Image: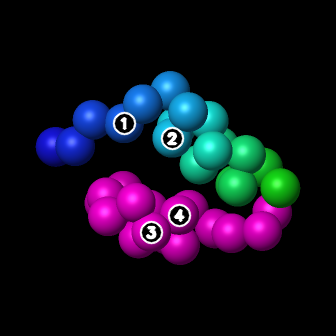
Amino acid sequence: MPKFSLDEKLEAIHRYQNGAEGVKSIAKSLRINHE
């Protein structure tokens, strides 16, 4: 399982909160399982 930096985690959170992308889209771009 990949490890992510705090910056990467925060970026994913901001992308979701801004409503620009959904969970599945963000997970796919980070190559992780959306579940």
- Mark 3 or 2 closer to N-term? 2
Horizontal arrangement in the rendering, residue 4 relative to residue 20 (left or right): left
Give me the C-alpha separation between circle 1 and circle 2.
Answer: 6 Å
How far separated are the C-alphas under marks 4 and 2? 11 Å
Q: Secondary structure at mark 4?
A: helix
Q: CA distance from mark 1 to mark 4?
A: 13 Å
Mark 1, residue position = 4
| Residue to which mark 2 is pinned | 8
Tag 3 near tag 2, CB within 8 Å:
no
Q: CA distance from mark 1 to mark 3?
A: 13 Å
Task: Indicate which disc, 1 or 4, sits on the residue closer to the N terminus.
Answer: 1
Say whether disc 1 or disc 3 marks the residue closer to the N-terminus.
1
Residue type, mark 3 in image:
Ser
**Label 1 with label 2: CB-CB less than 8 Å:** yes
Q: Residue at x 81, y 63 (%)?
A: 19
- Residue 25's spot in the image, x, y percent? 53, 72
